[in-house]
Image (cartoon, rainbow, N blue to C red):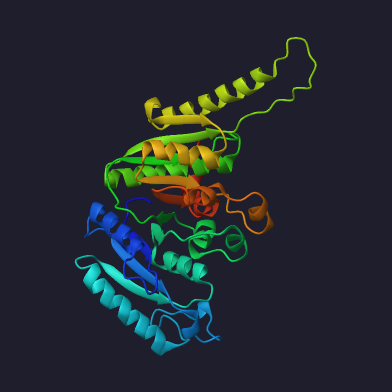
Amino acid sequence: MRQLQTILAVIEPHEMRQVALERALALANAAGRRKAKIVAVMPTERALVSKDAKLDEMTDDSQVTADEPALKRHLRWLQAYLNINAMGYDVTARVIPPQETGKGITAVAREVGADFIIKAADKHKFFGSVLNPPLDLQLLRHAPVPVLVAKDHIWHPTGTIAVALDMSDPSDLQLRQLNVRLLREAQELSQITHCTIHLLNSIAPVVPPSSIDMPGFTPDLVGDEALKESCRNVLAFAARHRISPDHCHIREGQADSVIPSMCTELNPTCLFIGTSARKGLALALVGNICERVVDELSCDVAVITPKAVRERIPFAQQVKE
């Protein structure tokens, strides 16, 4: 995030209550209204846009060249809504066509230099999410900046920020970079909101081969040693980044069940988590943990993709883990 300056909030057409905008206003208010700028982006309806319109035809002078009267009506509605519901904040209205909506939003995020994309949570169905993913999942998989999935609840800017680490392979450079980026973004948000950082880690249970016939071999010892090693890795990571051991929460089990359980106990304001950015068949067979837990959590979920880490290679290359 690095000194929150620009927030991109995705506006839901035909909704009078905009959860993403509410969250953006809360963050801007915490960061300082004069310091933070909000860009409100609203996708338009497919029926109102010409089939010949292309996303790359967007210009600064005209949001789209497809159905200009309809787009202007949407823009006027959005500006009127912001004048009432975002009074006193620096908010810019943008309208984009429905073709390649996810790519259009990320293009705007690049253009304005957004530090955060905020999108209200959608309802997900398994097969629909694989074949035709909703907008929030599109952003989770491909956005070059952190994506905050905002839940419909009152947001308390003080409390706890949870960071879900992936310590499954300490030798994996990409995982190490992602863990550090998650913590850095959470720390930036904690400086604004005065929340306390807590680290979460799930340790997958080890099932040793019980058929090995060796003198003195006990299968349970293999799992115990793996558990101790994972705990040492998490505590070492916390120590390097000056996180108190009391704020480290380590539990054995699968991440998609352990993380929601720990969040229920901690009741964090927001959970930071990484995604593998899988798609296609790999997504259908394995899935992304962040997508499986986002529906189960009542708190906001901030997601960072490996692509978001690679977008800041100079930062990532400084990581010495």
Q: Position of residue 4 (x, y in %)?
A: 32, 54
Hey, which residue is sitting farthest top in the picture?
216
Q: Position of residue 10 (x, y in %)?
A: 39, 66
* Residue 319 visible in the shown view: no
Q: Nearer the viewer, residue 113 or 10?
A: 10
Instruction: Residue at 36% x, 50% y: name it.
Output: 2
The spot of residue 254 in percent (x, y) is 57, 37
Residue 287's x, y, as percent? 61, 51
- The one nearer the camera, 141 or 311, is 141
Does residue 63 appear anywhere in the picture? yes
Question: Could you tell whether 132 is left or right of 65 in the image?
Answer: right
When the figure is inspected, residue 307 is found, relative to residue 97, above or below; the finding is above
Q: Is residue 139 depicted above or below 245 in this figure?
A: below
How many numbered marks have been drawn onto this rendered protein structure? Answer: 0
In percent of the image, x 27 and y 42: which residue is there? 194
Residue pictured at 61% horizontal, 34% vertical: 171
Residue that protrudes farthest toward the bottom in the picture: 69
128 vs 244, nearest the viewer: 128
Q: Is 246 located above or below residue 172 in the figure?
A: above
Residue 125: name its quadrant: bottom right
Q: Kindly identify the residue that appears in the image at 61 percent across and 24 percent down.
A: 226
Find residue 238 and report its image quarter. Answer: top left
